[in-house]
Amino acid sequence: MTTLPPELANLPAPSLVETISYEARYDALKIRLVEIFAAAGIDYDVQDLETDPAQILLQVAAYQDVLLRQRVNEAIKSWFLAYATGGDLDVLAQWYDVVRLVGETDDALRRRVVLSIQGRSTGGTEARYRAIALGADVQVADATVYTIGRDPTIHVAVFSTALGGIADAALLAKVDAALQAPTVRMVNDTIVVASAAQQTIPVTANVWLLPQAPQGIIAEIETYLRAAWARDMLLGRDLTSSWLTAQLQRDGVHRIELVTPVADIVIPFNQAAALGVVTLTIQGRNY
């Protein structure tokens, strides 16, 4: 599933993209066929019979017309940042001097393009520094740029795709080198790069399974939770009980009772929550 940056998420579809209906195209072709027969002096009423040759030809023509129009729609969308994928997105990104990192997803590349556009000024904007940090290595899952009070020091907090989100020394060195480059850093800027502060949060829950659910579903639930955590729990994302319950409530689960954390956890904008030990205890089976 594509996750669009906020700047692109609520944009209307391009007006050039056509809403396609097979039924509408078939009806239009049928009307045109009757007109052609009438112009030739033939009173032919197209019958809705499966064996009618005209009916069969109209169906084939309508289907081919729909395929062609859909291909045109896809070609149009490939030139819009919100819709382009794969190689089409690579071409759009190059217009803004952004090149896909090895292993970088479409969503991550699209986010960097938006930040690159926002940070086109060479004045050391927050968006520009964040775009540079995200482009330093594919292991940078997220980064935030901020100052503390009136201190002009620019802090960059890095959240990693590995090690539970903790950015190691090698990754921090890559980000620091990218930000300290003479073509990037403003002369008067002091930039400090560090790993995003972590809150390691254990999760404990009681689980009631449906009668037909296999015993091994508990391991699958934990795997799903960790994958969802890696996807959603980026910098500044609060950890809520409702989010945890939703991730644990998988197929085969009758009920979830969250034990810990006992309340929603508010995460500061420059920090991220790390997932600790997950303890899921089966309490029985029920409908």
Image: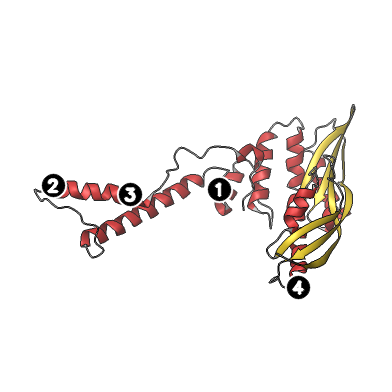
Q: CA distance from mark 4 to mark 3?
A: 52 Å
Mark 2 / mark 4, whichever is N-terminal: 2
What is the three-letter code of the residue carrying label 3? Answer: Arg
Q: Which of the two discs, 3 and 1, sits closer to the camera?
A: 3
* Residue position for label 1: 84
Q: Position of residue 37 (x, y in %)?
A: 14, 50
Q: CA distance from mark 3 to mark 2?
A: 20 Å
Instruction: Tell whether label 4 touches label 1 (CB within 8 Å).
Output: no
What is the three-letter code of the residue carrying label 2? Answer: Ala
Compared across the picture, whether 62 is left or right of 137 comes to left
Residue 236 sits in quarter: top right
Q: Nearer the viewer, residue 192 or 147?
A: 147
Compared across the picture, whether 107 is left or right of 126 comes to left
Mark 1 / mark 2, whichever is N-terminal: 2
Query: Which element carries disc 1, helix, strand or loop?
Result: loop
**Whether residue 19 is visible:** yes
* Residue position for label 2: 38
Mark 4 / mark 3, whichever is N-terminal: 3
